[in-house]
Image (cartoon, helix red, strand yellow):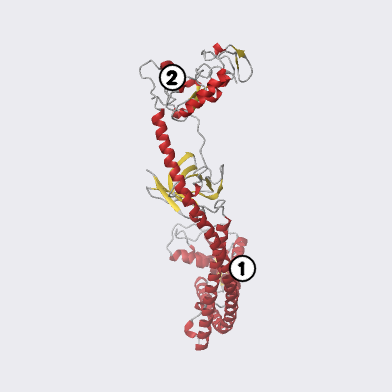
Amino acid sequence: MNVMENFNLFITVFCGIFTLINCTSIVKPRGIAFERASLYVPDKDFSCFDGSYIIPFSFVNDDYCDCPDASDEPGTSACPNGTFHCTNAGHTSLVIPSSRVNDGICDCCDGSDEWANMLRKGTCENTCEELGRAAREEAERVQKIFVAGHEIRAQLIAKGKELRLEKQNRITELFEIQRSAELTKNNTLYAKETAEEIEKSALEKYKIMNDEKKRQENEKEKLKDQNEAFEIFNQIDTNKNNKIEEEEVEAYATFDQNNDGTVSQDEKDYFMENKKEITLEDFVLNGWIRLKQLMLVENMDVKDTELPVDVDNDRQVEETEDQDENEDDSDHVEDDVKYTESEDFDESQYDEETKLIIEEAKQARNAFEEADRKFRDLQREVTHLQESLNKDFGPEDEFAALDGECYELSDREYVYKLCLFDQITQRSKNGGSEVRLGTWNSWIGEPKYRTMLYDRGQHCWNGPQRSTHVRLSCGLEPALLSATEPNRCEYAMDFVVPAVCVQHSERPSAPVTDAEHDEL
């Protein structure tokens, strides 16, 4: 090791021990870290780090970029791709782009990046000691949070494992209860079906009675309609030849639908189906139906109604057939209905035995419905527990105790609600329904268990489904700190929780960004 290397090593150790001394004035050349000082030997030509050129050492930091990799200008802004190392004794060292050297803005807390402006007014003050002290205090505060949070995390792990065991035991217990509940359900189902068969038999005679009653009522209506048809036919058939002729239709005012005082040929053709005369049989089958429609319109006092001139008889027949088919289907459905709704019949006609049978069937149905409800409730609980056990609550179940816990955050416009491992919603303070910003999906990114993905939210207007990334950091109490929408329909949240307080995790130093390049 030569003298220069020994000297650089001495300076490195010396500055590491006595941080109060501003070592930037001792180490040459300017703008390099102590550990790289041995690469710059004043009494030797300088070799570019990429091996492209060998230049005289006097070219180093001469404000002219000779090396393509900018290694010859660590202390100036000559190379656009260069960097400047701030020693920042007493605080954290920093590497900045060389373009910020001597630009009038203090980036290094020791002011070394503004070495050419030191004699000007407003020289950068050395704030490293003050910043270092504040940084150490902050680091100490954060470390205390991590220590305390780590203890809480241990409690959460213990709670998570306890909850997992409880769920497993509960599922085993529910399986036993479920088997018993299924047996009860099957027994009550058999009892219900048996009681309903007895009920059906008991109500059969009442169904026959009701059907006969309905048939008689229908016969009465049919007979009444026929009598009315005969009466109207005789009114129109003025010459009593048992036929309705055109002259008789002209004399019947009901056929004058447009109320112009005469029955037109179109109006006669509509009723008579383009025939010259209608017999009683034709009238009852077809003409009476048409006439009733005209009489209905007349009774409703509907004026200016145009009669259809060209009537599609085939179409009318099809509609009539469809109506008959529907009536047949209706009758068929009634036949298939089980006798489980005694309300369809007049209960006042039941004898005491029938009433008792109906009551027993009702009780059997209620017992089955209750047994079925209990069985389905047990199934839902088992499914819910199994889904919970399948969720990834961390390598040590440290997040299990937070499953389903909800936390809210309000800003000027919205109230955000995060329910862990469930869903995220947004509610406007001006009213309206909640908007789902996502449903729990999985952990994403590295390191694992630091970012949660909630997707499959509600669709944006003319956009995709909403989704949210929840970033986790260490905190003593679970709390939702922020909620933003960096991209349309894509949300980001910051959440603190002791479950992520791992003592050995450290954040790497972040490079300086343009946002941090502020004039002092």
* One can see residue 12 in this view: yes
Which residue type carries mark 1? Glu
Q: Residues within 10 Å of mark 1 (few under 14, many from 20)?
A: few
Q: Is residue 89 above or below residue 121?
A: below
**Quarter holding the C terminus?**
top left
Q: Residue at x 56, y 42 (%)?
A: 447
| Residues marked 2 and 1 touching at CB (< 8 Å) | no
As displayed, is residue 421 above or below residue 324?
above
Q: Which residue is mark 1?
A: 325
Sequence-first disc among 2 and 1: 2
Left or right placement of residue 188 versus residue 436 in this view:
right
Q: Which residue is mark 2?
A: 114
Residue at x-position 37% and y-position 47%: 430
* Nearest the eye: 402 or 89: 89
Residue 71 position in % (x across, y down):
57, 19
Q: Quadrant of the N terminus?
A: top right
As rendered, which of 515 and 15 lies closer to the eye? 15
Query: Looking at the image, is mark 2 or mark 1 nearer the viewer?
Result: 2
Q: Is residue 311 left or right of residue 412?
A: right
Q: In front: 287, or 422? A: 422
| Residue drawn at (48%, 48%) of the image | 150
Q: Is residue 16 above or below residue 270?
A: above
How far apart marks 2 and 1 lie (CA) works out to: 98 Å
Q: Around disc 2, counting alpha carbons within 10 Å, would you say few (fewer than 14), some (14 to 19), or many (20 or more)? A: many
- Residue 41 horizontal/vertical position (percent): 57, 16
Q: Amino acid at mark 2?
A: Glu
